[in-house]
Amino acid sequence: MSQCCLDKNVRSAGPAYFANVAIKINAKFGGRNLEFANPKESLSGVTIEPTIIFGADVTHPPALDDTAPSIASVVASQDWPKVANYNGIVRAQGHRKELINGLEDIVKELLLAFKERSKRRPKQLIFQLHPYIHAIVFMFQ
């Protein structure tokens, strides 16, 4: 495991910088950086049935760049019912393309990882698409 830090950032860093680095290292070792004190109360709709939560976004190159690819990322929770650990997949795609290429394959890969880790298939899928603030919930039969 490694975590890179620029010398200039370390020399001028305050506690928030080092806390951020520690959070990244903890996540790389499989630790949890967040855990709900009472998940059944905080996440009532999520803790009843096995649920996987997805998030997706595409970031684009600067306005004057005509050639660089857009970068798509999709994350999914892996540790139901705590939903504190996530796997992520990042892919380069066409310049300024908002639709995520190969989204079906990415979702399948993350669903298989969820099933392998939790030893069950999700009954609910929640998908958050940025910048849209709508979550779509699918019930699996």
Image: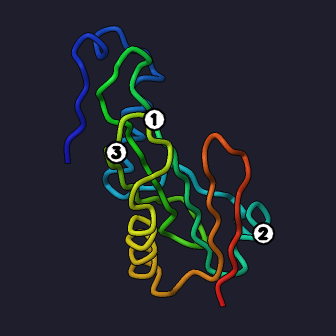
Give residue 59's mark. Answer: 1
Q: Distance between the residues labelled 3 and 2?
A: 37 Å
Q: What residue type is labelled 1?
A: Thr
Q: Distance between the residues labelled 1 and 3?
A: 10 Å
Of labels 1 and 2, earlier in sequence is: 2
Give residue 93's mark. Answer: 3
Q: Do the residues labelled 1 and 2 touch (CB within 8 Å)?
A: no
In the image shown, does 6 or 89 lie closer to the viewer?
A: 89
In front of the other: label 1 or label 3? 3
- Residue under numbered circle 2: 44
Kindly identify the residue that appears in the image at 39 percent across and 26 percent down.
61
Kindly identify the residue that appears in the image at 63 percent across and 54 percent down.
128
Relative to 132, residue 63 above or below: above
Q: What residue type is labelled 3?
A: Gln
Of labels 3 and 2, earlier in sequence is: 2
Of labels 1 and 3, earlier in sequence is: 1
Q: Provide residue 28's location: percent of width, then percent of height.
A: 32, 51
Q: In which quarter of the image is the C terminus?
A: bottom right
Kindly identify the residue that appears in the image at 45 percent across and 86 percent down.
119
Q: Which amino acid does label 2 sit on?
A: Ser
